[in-house]
Amino acid sequence: MIRILKIFGLLTLICYSISGFSQTSEINIRFIGNCGLYMTDGTSNIYIDFPYKSGAHNYMEYDLSELDSVKSKPIFIYTHKHSDHFSGRLVKKLAKRLDGKVYTPRNVKELLKLNNELADFKIEAFETKHQFSINHYSYLLTWHNKKIFISGDTEHAETIASLKEIDWAFVPAWLLMDANEKGVKLGVISKMFAVYHIGPDDNITNEDPKIILLNKQGEIIKIPY
C-alpha cells in the first residue's frame, strides 16, 4: 500500500547549502541511503547507520563502490541493528581493514569517549523507542559549535522536543507527523530538517523551505562553521 505523507510547514526560509565537498571550515554530510550518512570536517570521518544491508526490507540499495570509498580510521555509529541500518559482517570487515571503530547501542558508553578523542566534538546519546527494536538510540552531535540531531528510526518526537537550538535535524517523515499530531513546534527547535529513510512506496510532499527531502543518493549538505 502506498503511504501518502504530508510534511507540515514549520517556519520561514533561512539559508542552507547543498553542494559538493569542501575542506574549508565546513562539516559536509553526504546522504548514502536510508539513514546512512557520511560526515566529515576534513579531518574526522564519521559514518552513521552505514554500511547496512543493501536493499533490505525493500529500502534503498547502494553501489558497492560506497564500501570501497570508506576513509581510513572511520568511526561507525549506529542507531540500532535492523538490517536496513546495519550489517555486522560488512562493518566488521571495514573496521578491521581501515582501523575503524564501531559503536552500536550495545557499547554506547564507549561512544561517549569520542568527546575526548575528536577535536571540538561532543556526542550525546538518547535512548529512544522504535517498533520491533530492543535497543534504539538517537544522537545529538555538537561539532565545531554546530548541533546536528540524528533521530534514526524512532517514531516519537518527545526526545527532539526536549532539545533546542539545533542547526540540522535528520528525521524520518513519521517523526514530523508525530510532532504535528502532538502539537510540538519543531520549527523553534531546529533551523533545518532533512527527511531521510524514504521508502519506495512513500509519496511525501513538502512545501516548507526549512525541510529538504533526502530522496536522491549522493546529496551533500554543507554546514559552515
Image (spheres, rainbow, N blue to C red):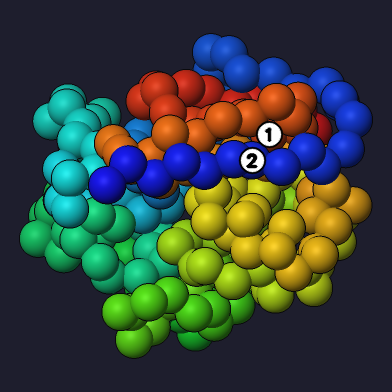
Q: Position of residue 29 (x, y in %)?
A: 53, 34
Q: Counting residues from the N terminus, which is met first, the one under dot 1 or under dot 2?
A: 2
Q: Position of residue 104 (x, y in %)?
A: 36, 73
- Residue that carries the numbered disc 2 in the rendered image: 7
Residue type, label 2: Ile
Near-viewer residue (203 or 24): 203
Near-viewer residue (99 or 122): 122
Residue 69 left/right relative to 223:
left
Residue type, label 1: Ile
Which mark lies nearer to you, 1 or 2? 2
Is disc 1 in contact with disc 2, using a CB cutoff of under 8 Å?
Answer: yes
Q: Position of residue 34 (x, y in %)?
A: 35, 44
Direction top: furthest residue: 20
Q: Residues within 10 Å of mark 2 (few under 14, many from 20)?
A: some
- Give the spatial CA distance, label 1 vs label 2: 8 Å
Is residue 14 visible in this depiction of the protein?
yes
Near-viewer residue (139 or 103): 139
Q: Residues within 10 Å of mark 1 (few under 14, many from 20)?
A: many
Q: Secondary structure at mark 2?
A: loop
